Image: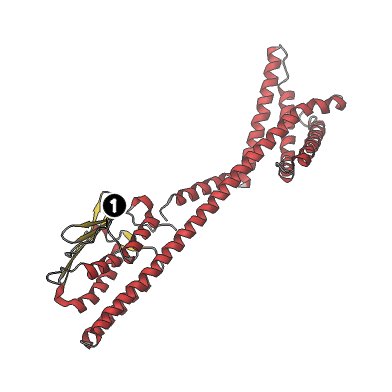
Amino acid sequence: MYLPVQSNHQAAENTSRWMQPGISWLLSFLGFTAFGFFNFEYRYLDNLARGIHHTFAIHLFEEMTGTYVGLALFPFVIWAIRRFRIRRDNWRIMVPINLLIMCAFSVADTTGMSIVRSLLSPLFGLGQYDYGIMLYRYPMEFAQHVLFFWFAVGGIYAFDSYREARDRQVASADLEARLAEAQLQNLQLQLQPHFLFNALNTISSVMYDDVRRADAMLARLSDLLRRTLQTGHSQEVPLGEELALVKSYIAIMEERFGDHLQVEFAVDPHVMRTLVPQLILQPLVENAMRHGRNPQTSKLALRIAAIQEDSNLLLRVQDNGPGMSVDSSDQMSKGIGLSNTEQRLLSLYGTRQQMLLENANGLRITIRLPLHTEAVSI
């Protein structure tokens, strides 16, 4: 439906694309590579500042091999951090476990760098690689590993929290959409039987006085039901189809009221394909049939209009009756049909719609809708 829910879904879909495994690992690779290059730049430029030359190749080799060994271990770090997540209710157990994981990662990374560099150094023409005395290398590298590990913990926790919040948002949006759909269907189920019973009562009122007219009205009702079923459960239909339904209903009423009913249509042909809520006009017309007749002549003059105003569609139903009564709070009392219509509009379009009731030589009902030709998403 036309609610912020739609934009939430779109935002969640866009975020999901960035969270796909392939893209995530590509970003990780680029991040590790950048980190290794910056470390290389620092060490190499530091040597140049001290007057030490010819260290470009060895520093680039050391930093990039160290970076990619860390990248190879990174999936296991992520798994371990998530598997032994520290929470308020388990921190006494999980903090020591995480410290052990940190130490294990440090030993594995330092050992991996020693092995990889020893194997690859001759292949790159750098001769045999001497990593020095490992007894000192392990605590030396450990200092950097502590920073890396807890930075990874913070980053993974933040990422997972964001993803969980996003999933809750998507679930909430989906629930909201389903509830709105259920509400709209419930309103339709209330509206359609209400309309059908009124039509049958109208036919029943003339059945014994004029069988021919009753038969004609039944044929009109059959055509009307056929049109209604053709629209299915769509919340919106083109205005042309909605007007065809209204005309079928009016044809039934014309059989009953004869010359006492006069209906005028003033519809801009350019808006015939504009989408409107299904059965949006019928309760307005039905309300006019029941309450809009002139009390002095018992005649009903009904005018149905549809025009475009800027980016909106205006639907208007005007009768020549006594108008609608106003209560003590200056609010017009609405029946089931008008109340359901108002709720449907609010559910479908939120604040982008308006339903205005005015006493102006009869009751004039104006509905303002956003002009669009694509179905509203539910």
At 35% from the left and 63% from the top, the residue drawn is: 340
- In which image quadrant can residue 306 be found? bottom left
Q: Residue furthest top?
A: 51
At 27% from the left and 61% from the top, the residue drawn is: 272
Counting from the top left corner in percent of width and height, residue 370 is at: 32, 53
Q: Is residue 151 above or below residue 213?
A: above
Q: Is residue 375 above or below residue 90?
A: below
Task: Tell me: 360 left or right of 10.
Answer: left
Task: Tell me: 20 left or right of 238.
Answer: right
Q: Residue furthest front?
A: 328
Number of marks drawn? 1
Closer to us: 189 or 28: 189
The kind of residue tagged 1 is Asn
Q: Secondary structure at mark 1?
A: strand
Report the quarter where the N terminus lies. bottom left
Is residue 283 something that shows in the picture?
yes
Which residue bears the numbered disc 1? 312
Counting from the top left corner in percent of width and height, residue 180 is at: 45, 59
Its colouring scheme is: secondary structure
Counting from the top left corner in percent of width and height, residue 136 is at: 85, 24
- Crowding at mark 1 (Cα within 10 Å: few <14, some 14-19, many 20+): some
- In which image quadrant can residue 337 be found? bottom left
Q: Is residue 230 above or below residue 89?
A: below
Task: Tell me: 201 left or right of 132.
Answer: left
Counting from the top left corner in percent of width and height, residue 20 is at: 60, 47
Is residue 129 something that shows in the picture?
no
Report the quarter where the C terminus lies. bottom left
- In which image quadrant can residue 360 be found? bottom left
At 32% from the left and 72% from the top, the residue drawn is: 195
Task: Tell me: 365 left or right of 160.
Answer: left
